[in-house]
Image (cartoon, coloured by chain):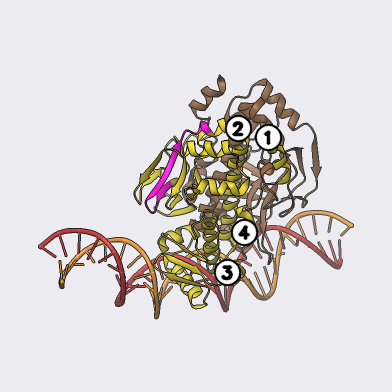
Chain colours: A brown, B yellow, C red, D orange
Amino acid sequence: MPDTSPLIKRLSLFAPLSDGDVTKLKQLEGQTRRVPPRTEVVRQGDPVRNCLAVRRGWSVRAKLMADGRRQITDLVLPGDLVGLYADVLPVADQTVITNTAVEFAEFPPDAVAALFFEHPRLAAAFAWTAAREQAILAEKVTCLGRRTAYERVAHFLLEVFERLRVVGLTEDNRFTLPISQEAIADTLGLSPVHVNRMLARLRQEGAIRIDGTLVELLDLTMLKRAADYDELYLLHRRLPAPLERRLAA
Amino acid sequence: MPDTSPLIKRLSLFAPLSDGDVTKLKQLEGQTRRVPPRTEVVRQGDPVRNCLAVRRGWSVRAKLMADGRRQITDLVLPGDLVGLYADVLPVADQTVITNTAVEFAEFPPDAVAALFFEHPRLAAAFAWTAAREQAILAEKVTCLGRRTAYERVAHFLLEVFERLRVVGLTEDNRFTLPISQEAIADTLGLSPVHVNRMLARLRQEGAIRIDGTLVELLDLTMLKRAADYDELYLLHRRLPAPLERRLAA
DNA sequence: CGGCTACTTGAAGGATTTCAACGTAGGTGG
DNA sequence: CCACCTACGTTGAAATCCTTCAAGTAGCCG
């Protein structure tokens, strides 16, 4: 299947999906919507309506402060789900803005609750997604709290690379990074100028190469050492055996 | 009920619980275990066995880096749940260490999944808890990425105050803060020395008063302004009406 | 070509860390 | 009961990392 959606790719990593599961996912992702770059898909403070499943394009989830500062809390990449908790939240606590043209599917939040009854394996996969999202957030807290600017930039590149890899959006050690250095700065809690300097340093050290939006990681070992990187938190591993047995029943 | 557990207190804030729900919670919390201060309750990298429901005492959830740096990602206070995702995770991505003597109940992770069938309202309440935890993490990312040390300390005090308040652990504007300034530093991504200075400044400005482990917030308005604080993210509001209607059915 | 946006680089300033020293309270053993 | 010890809090001074300000370059699109 060359047309496999990134979501299906990503969830298959967690557990082999049955035909029924795949059919259900295709149904959820059936109707897609396209929005241009710099569109607010979800607005902080608004009531949340739908869950989104991103098929193409980059967005960011961000918190906006009263005085204009902003912090990007997570990237939203193809295969990612937005608003899994929509059902249970009064209003969105964050804004989601597209960075490129983005294509995504929408479905009602109670469809997620319904999964628990009809598609327990998918429900587990969605729970796993939520757990992964939380682990990514915790890792980001660690980055911002305890890593230097240099380490943060290296860590950022490695995380993006690995997250794109599992949805098939890398080639060798290359990927496209369609966001500005200012956006990276808002992700890493740094100034744009300093992000630029750290990228320059990584470039000079031969760890990376950048050509426009194309990034190549030339020395993964060195990057991982520099970032104190352990990708365990991304949970790109098979699910626990006990759960597997239970779901197989 | 003077004996109401902090968990029941907290979840009641989300939705009025039925007698059956309360009975179920009491059953989950039935057997408690006590551990002394500075005990590793969950160890980063170990397989996760159980979910925990904390009844008394303070713990922290932390990420430990190879070179000894640590980042506290969240406080674990009475009424908090630990390891909601245990079922779906291969290993713990964080360590949980008690700071004081702690009393908590343990229950198997699949008990959470079972809730969805027998106690949908509790299941929703647990989902809400998970959503709240994630919102707290996102807010922490914003703190670490975009707030100054002064703002972070003010924000920290306000968050702790509000979280303790809903489980009945405050009196007027006072609460006990049984953790060291070093632990606060590891929470806020600062050095212990600087935390001390910021606390001193808040004290001089008349915003707070500290006597041992007792903290009093003297000027909430000023603190909230200083921290750019909006406690919306703590989700201490009633659940959305549509969900309420569905659960009432 | 002009104007926009993003990237780049240098220099100065500021926020926070590190280093160091001292004070204080509680706990333990002589 | 006192002396010691340790952990924690406090304060000053120097060093560092990162930001801010400023100016210049490169690419892109009308």
What is the distance, in whole Å, between disc 2 and disc 4 at their CAs?
29 Å
Count of picture labels: 4
Q: Is residue A77 visible?
A: no
Instruction: Classify 10 Å Cα crowding around label 2: few (below 14), some (14-19), many (20 and above).
Output: some
Q: Of discs 3 and 1, which sits in the foreground?
A: 3
Mark closer to the chain start, 3 or 4: 3
Q: Residue at x 67, y 37 (%)?
A: A79
Q: Which residue is drawn at 53% across and 45% down?
A: B8
Which percent across, then down, holds residue A141?
53, 53
The boundaries of the magenta stretch are B96-111
Q: Which chain carries label 3?
A: B
Residue tagged 2: B116
Query: In screen coordinates, is B221 left or right of B179?
Result: right
Callouts 2 and 4 on one subunit: yes
Q: Of discs 4 and 1, which sits in the foreground?
A: 4
Residue tagged 3: B220
Q: Residue at x 50, y 29 (%)?
A: A240
Q: Which residue is drawn at 41% across and 38% down?
A: B31
In terms of image quadrants, where is residue D19? bottom right
Above or below residue A120? Residue B57 is below
Task: Name the amino acid, label 3.
Answer: Leu
What is the distance, in whole Å, between disc 3 and disc 4 at their CAs?
12 Å
Task: Name the amino acid, label 2.
Answer: Phe
Q: Can residue A161 be seen in this view?
A: yes
Residue tagged 1: A112
Q: Of discs 2 and 4, which sits in the foreground?
A: 2
The dot on residue B231 is 4
Say which element carries label 4.
helix
